[in-house]
Image (cartoon, coloured by chain):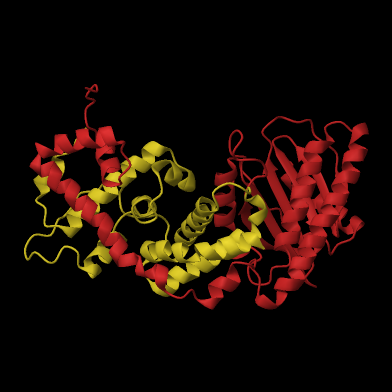
Amino acid sequence: MDERNAIVDLIPRLRRYARALVGDRSAADDLVQDTLERAWSKFHLYRGGTDLRAWLFTVMHNVHVNRVRAQRPVDVLPDDGPETPQHGAQADPLMIRDLERALASLPAEQREVLLLVALEDMSYDEAARTLGVPIGTVMSRLSRGRERLRLKMFDVPVAAKLTVVK
Amino acid sequence: MSTELPITEADLQAFIDGRLTDGRRVEVEAWLASRPDEALRVAQLRGQREALHDLYDPVLDEPVPERLVRAAGRSRRSRGYALAAGWIAIGAVAGVLAGWQLHDWQSRRLPAVSEGASIARNAAIAHATYSPEVRHPVEVGADQEAHLVAWLSKRLGEKVRAPTLKAAGLSLMGGRLLPGAGDPAKGPQPAPVAQFMYQGAKGQRVTLYVRTEARSHDETAFRFAREGNVRVFYWIDRSFGYALSSSDLDRSQLQRVADLVYQQLEP
């Protein structure tokens, strides 16, 4: 049961990603549990020798998307909607609750890419394959997600966000 | 000196993630040195990366809940079923393999049967996997039939329908999406497959497996296959391949259901 041990070894990483993705601890572990059960029941589809981690994250992505779809019709946030940076009292920008809340406010597709790259340290190519999207989509979601998160975390004047480099 | 390519947003992202070559990194650093606003933004984004690790890395050190360790070696069924189900699955696969070899031998006289035989085999595996499910036999229940049919049609790229099998005493439980069989590393991803599940008054289960056919095929007559303890009637009709599977119904009962399906799906 080498494969099973390899999967078990990856559980902490799946949990970390799920926690960041859905926020709530027990909801995150439910997502991990569904992912593991689905992965095991579809293990015959896994091609030995390829990246087991990427495969498990793909399964988790699919499980998550199906759950989100079952709960809410669509993600209501536009991909690049207007920002409303909060001015006023400058809080500690790295305050944990702020970061969690800011992360939760991102469109799900931007949050996924950001977490796979920044937290899971996947290459852009791995993230693209895991999510089944082109690499250009990964780059644009990553850039937008990071910028949106930054504007929520820091007290940035609106004009500053227009300095987009091309 | 290298040819100085303009610094793009993608370069800045790769800089933040430490994924630039040394040469390019030096160029980006030089570029940022003369642009304090951009340098501040990039520094904040690097800090964001670190903050995410500070916030979530402690999860890596938490003890893994026992339920997750158990889930790593178990399919979607309750614990008590796991071992028995495992043996059933092994038996089904062994039966399928044996059936496949037999089929291969037979198919020498029957050209074009291999396409149909693969649908029978895949349908039998899917039936053996999901029909014993107690808690999660389907992904979307029959109470949301309109949603189910719309969803599966969208994913298959063809309009599919769930036939009514009341005349055979079977009611629709719901359905699920399955990955198409094939090797994703080679060529385009195979289209996904739909599975509808039906149940009779005594708990007999029948699944209808519906697959879109990439190539245009001549229609085939009903064919019968027995894969392990799963009986399958399958046929290809224009752009769809169908397989009706059950281990609870005998051959003549299953044929009657197949007739019902065929009549309803005929446009």
Image point (39%, 65%), residue name: A22
Q: Residue furthest left?
A: A88
Residue B267 visible at all: no
Front-most of residues B195 and B87: B87
Q: Residue A152 at what x, y percent from top left?
A: 19, 57
Q: Residue B39 at what x, y percent from top left?
A: 14, 44
Task: Tell me, by letter, which chain the rendering colours red.
Answer: B
Q: Is residue B158 above or below residue B65?
A: above
Q: Residue B156 at what x, y percent from top left?
A: 60, 43
Q: Is residue B46 above or below residue A7?
A: above
Front-most of residues B62 and B257: B62
Number of marks in the rendered image: 0
The quarter of the image holding the C terminus of chain A is top left
Image point (74%, 69%), residue name: B85
Residue B76 visible at all: yes
Task: Tell me, by letter, which chain the rendering colours yellow.
Answer: A
Residue B184 placement, left or right of A76: right
Q: Residue A154 at what x, y percent from top left?
A: 14, 57
Front-most of residues A9 and B214: A9
